[in-house]
Image: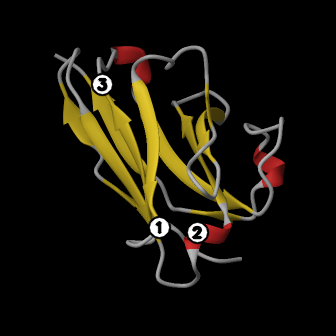
Amino acid sequence: QLQLVESGGGLVQPGGSLTLSCATSEFALDYYAVGWFRQAPGKGREGVACISSSGQTTDYADSVKGRFTASRDNAKNTVYLQMNGLKPEDTAVYYCAARLLYGATWNDTTKFHSWGQGTQVTVSA
């Protein structure tokens, strides 16, 4: 299992913005689709967004559509999650994960083979 590293989490006020990054030095990320997931205390891990290896296809959870944007810079071996209009219910640990094939089951955690350790996002006044 290869390791990804997330960064960019923190404390932000409601309505604010954060950009999460997901990177690795262990493999070329541009061969893989990358998903973003989150897990709030006492809840299961849920899919937030997914971006194809080329960056041309993205999917989002209904709860974040119009507020979050996944992007990637394959030259930097990095994937991003731009989060705008943050709400208290967005508070969670955010994870990125990689999978070889992008499919309809973009938010199925079992399809992803490499995960990061997570970064905390807290939205609070």
Q: Distance between the residues labelled 1 and 3?
A: 23 Å
* Mark 2 residue element: helix
Dot 1 or dot 3: first in sequence order is: 1
Q: How far apart are marks 2 and 1 (CA)?
A: 5 Å
Left or right: 87 in relation to 78: left
Q: In the image shown, does 125 or 82 lie closer to the viewer?
A: 82
Disc number lying in front (3 or 2): 2
* Mark 3 residue element: loop
Dot 2 or dot 1: first in sequence order is: 2
> What mark, if any, has residue 74 been given in the picture?
1
Disc number lying in front (1 or 3): 1
Q: How far apart are marks 3 and 2 (CA)?
A: 25 Å
Q: Looking at the picture, how far across and down is residue 81, in whole percent?
A: 41, 42
Residue under the image location 55 percent in, 85 percent down? 26
Q: Looking at the picture, how far across and down is residue 13, in whole percent?
A: 17, 21
Number of marks in the rendered image: 3
Q: In the image shown, does 111 or 74 lie closer to the viewer?
A: 74
Left or right: 6 in relation to 65: left
Q: Are marks 1 and 3 in contact (CB under 8 Å)?
A: no
Residue under the image location 75 percent in, 39 percent down? 106
Give the image quarter of residue 36.
Answer: top right
Three-letter amino acid code at disc 3? Answer: Asn
> What mark, if any, has residue 84 been given in the picture?
3
